[in-house]
Amino acid sequence: MFDSVSLAATRFAPIRYLVEGYVAEGATLLAGAPKIGKSWMAMNIAYGVATGQPVFGTVPTRQGDVLYIALEDNPRRLQRRQAKMGATPSPHLKFHTRWMMLDEGAIEAMDAWIARSANPVLIVVDVLAKVRAQSRGNDQAYEADYYALSGMQSLASARNIAILIVHHTRKADADDPFDTVSGTRGLTGAADAVLVLRKDFANDRATLYGRGRDIAEIETAMVFDGAEGRWRALDAAEAAARSPEREAVIKVLMAAGGVALSAQEVADAVGTDNGKARKLLSRMASIGDIQRSTRGLYRWGAGDNGDKGTNDEGETDLLDLVA
């Protein structure tokens, strides 16, 4: 127990990042759709931290000992991935392809690894579903989800390390990317930070969204190099490059001469359906490509519309939009 006077006088060490701006000490949930490349991203982070080398192209890491619990892989596949990445083998990176369940000693085993490691800084759990306990019949869904992460969050906090937990997103879409995380808000509530990787199929790129107690909210355009098995953060110029679909929408709105158009009017002009046009228009407005005049109406004119965090409403983009 402590009072507010002693709290005010306490000097805490600054938050330490393992991956600058993305992964800090604490429990971080990394969620994405199946086959999107979230395990590759987790692997990139693990090797970067173990060797002290940058990830995502130029993002600095803090070097230390890493435990990677790869529950959907085997040694052969891990070897192939390491070779494909051209990663420097490191004694600071340890792999396990089997682990206990959370209600059968998983947290205690993680703590034991921390105790016997010289400089433990990161544990990766890939994936959550392989270690979480079966819910009991009288458990509420929120409580079961919160419990699934609370033990790892407590361990990370007590030991001043980062635990990165790989998880899936659900198929249903949502305006807020963080609402696509599979399960209830018990998972995102228990985590110190949440990263959501979402694919923009029209651009062959993805967006990494981040939100947490100790990290600033992030939204980074990413691209995956399948030949090298590495994710790279795009710079401002690359991220700003518009797809043919976006250019088609802009041409239609510019031709309207300042008159605000509905999603249906835009859809008719470019030859797609209302739902797809509505999703892309909302994304474009949220990043300032166009202006949202009133609800459901859009006009040409770049600017900040104050809708950060509501972009990328759908995993499917205007794949069949006529440019």
Image (cartoon, rainbow, N blue to C red):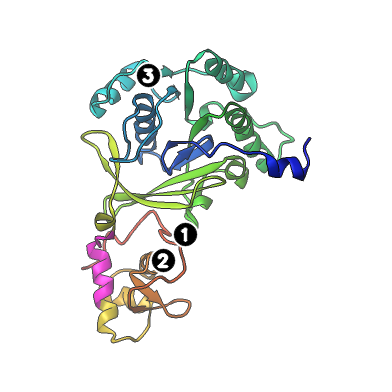
Q: Does the CB distance between marks 2 and 1 fall below 8 Å?
A: yes
- Left or right of 260? Residue 294 is right
Neighbour tally class for label 3: few under 14, some 14-19, many 20 plus, Cα within 10 Å = few
* Residue identified by numbered label 1: 309
Q: Residue at x 28, y 60 (%)?
A: 240
Magenta: predominant secondary structure element?
helix
Q: Does the CB distance between marks 1 and 3 fall below 8 Å?
A: no
Q: Residue at x 76, y 45 (%)?
A: 4
Q: Sequence-wise, which precedes: disc 1 or disc 3?
A: 3
Q: Is residue 219 above or below residue 59?
A: below
Q: Sequence-wise, which precedes: disc 2 or disc 3?
A: 3
Q: Which numbered mark, 1 or 3, is in the foreground of this view?
A: 1
- Left or right of 292? Residue 186 is right
* Residue identified by numbered label 2: 286
Neighbour tally class for label 2: few under 14, some 14-19, many 20 plus, Cα within 10 Å = many
Q: Sequence-wise, which precedes: disc 2 or disc 1?
A: 2
What range of the chain is rendered magenta?
Answer: 240-251
Q: Is residue 162 above or below residue 246?
A: above
- Left or right of 233? Residue 286 is right
Give the Cα distance between marks 2 and 3.
Answer: 42 Å
* Residue identified by numbered label 3: 74
**Label 3 SS:** loop
Amino acid residing under circle 1: Gly
- Provide residue 7's location: percent of width, then percent of height: 71, 42
- Provide residue 207's location: percent of width, then percent of height: 37, 51
Front in this rendered view, residue 125 or 212: 212
